[in-house]
Image (cartoon, grey):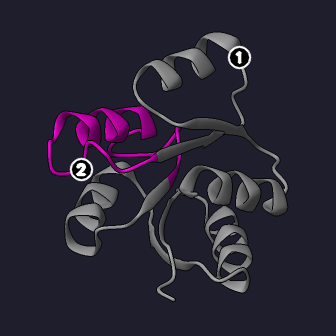
Amino acid sequence: MVAVKVLVVDDESFIINLLKNGLTENGFEVITARNGFDAILAVEEQQPDVVITDIMMPRLTGLEFLKALKNNPATADVPVFLISAMDQADMVQQGLDMGAVDYLTKPFKINEIIGKLRHHLT
């Protein structure tokens, strides 16, 4: 069985490592990027099955990255999960309206993220 490839995008090393370790331990293949600009390159080069991205990042925010993915026919179908400490209803709605499949808030439980990934990918 081929592992699901997840691109994790966050500017905080702690969050990247937490997600990478938890996902890898549960059978996912994980690639990472530190900002939205690098994430666009990673999507083009690595072709992940799903993306988990922070919103507040340097160079290109998670929402700008999401918009770029959804505007490109080659990547428009890649499912994107937003993850952020910002849990205001308007921010959540904006992310979902832009095409994110879910909006997760920090702090998070890795089991919750794994469950949501598996549910969405089945």
What's drawn in magenta, residue-wise?
52-79
Asked if 72 appears above or below 63 in the picture, the reply is below
Instruction: Name the outermost residue toward the top.
Output: 90
Q: Label 2 sits on what residue type?
A: Thr
Compare residues 58 and 31 and report the one nearer the observer: 31
User: Secondary structure under badge 2?
Assistant: loop
Q: Which residue position holds label 1? A: 88
Q: Residue 114 at x, y = what percent?
A: 72, 62
Q: Residue 16 at x, y = what percent?
A: 61, 67
Please report the residue visible at 30 percent of the width from the left and 61 percent of the height from the top: 38
User: Secondary structure under badge 1?
Assistant: loop
Instruction: Name the outermost residue toward the left.
Output: 73
The answer to whether mark 1 and mark 2 are in CB contact below 8 A is no
Q: Residue 106 at x, y = what percent?
A: 77, 43
Please report the residue visible at 73 percent of the width from the left and 25 percent of the height from the top: 87
Compare residues 91 and 34 and report the one nearer the observer: 91
Task: Find residue 75 and name its label.
Answer: 2
Asked if 104 appears above or below 16 in the picture, the reply is above
Q: Is residue 60 magenta?
A: yes
Please report the residue visible at 41 percent of the width from the left and 64 percent of the height from the top: 49
Badge 2 density bin: few <14, some 14–19, many ≥20, Cα 10 Å: some
Label 1 vs 2, first from the N-terminus: 2
